[in-house]
Amino acid sequence: MDKTDEKLLELLRLDSREPTASLARKLGLSRSTVQDRINRLVEKKIISGFTIRYHDEYRQQQITAHVMVCINQRHATGAIAQMKKMARIRALYVVSGSYDMIAVIKAPTMAEIDETLDDINAIDGVEKTTTSLVLSTKIDR
């Protein structure tokens, strides 16, 4: 991966729907060269897919909660499998420190956040959770 690939990735991160011709103009390359680079980045498993970014107005309607989870390690695999099935959990991280995992929940209402917290706490092996609600987002890259 070279500097041009890094610039291409940044442009795609900002707008994955930007036409190849427009990317080519910005990078000073031909359209076919840009398409070849994108294909190569996919083949090398640097790009795993293309997604959308939510508009700020929509994102502001969503409540975000970060849930720190302490779990009995004998139940970790099963707990992770159950949390993967919960659509409101957008990310799940295994972390070091006094907690074992951090789950990121997004939902349009506090009732749905509360319901998801109840679902997490009902999982075998979950010993303790601590939840922080996101009040505002200053940087979202």
Image: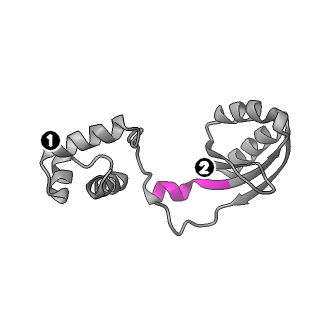
Residue at point 73%, 54% (across, down): 96
Residue 122 in sight in this render: no
The mark lying in front, picked from 2 and 1, is: 1
* Residue 11 lies within the magenta run: no
- Give the residue at the far front of this rendering: 2
Q: Is residue 13 left or right of residue 86?
A: left
Residue at point 21%, 52% (across, down): 23
| Start-end of magenta stretch | 57-65
- Give the residue at the far left of this rendering: 30
User: What percent of the width, then of the height, locates residue 16?
Assistant: 33, 47
How far apart, in angstroms, are the residues tagged by discs 2 and 1? Answer: 42 Å
> How many marks do you count on the picture?
2
In the rendered structure, which amino acid carries the disc numbered 2?
Answer: Pro
Residue 118, quarter of picture: top right
Q: Nearer the viewer, residue 136 or 129?
A: 129
Q: Is residue 41 left or right of residue 56?
A: left
Residue under circle 1? 32
User: What percent of the width, then of the height, locates residue 139?
Assistant: 50, 67
Q: Nearer the viewer, residue 1 or 139?
A: 1
Residue 65, quarter of picture: bottom right
Q: Is residue 137 left or right of residue 24?
A: right
Label 1: state its secondary structure: helix
Residue under circle 2? 108
Residue at point 19%, 59% (across, down): 26
Q: Is residue 61 above or below residue 76?
A: below
Q: Give the mark, 2 or 1, whose residue is nearer the N terminus.
A: 1
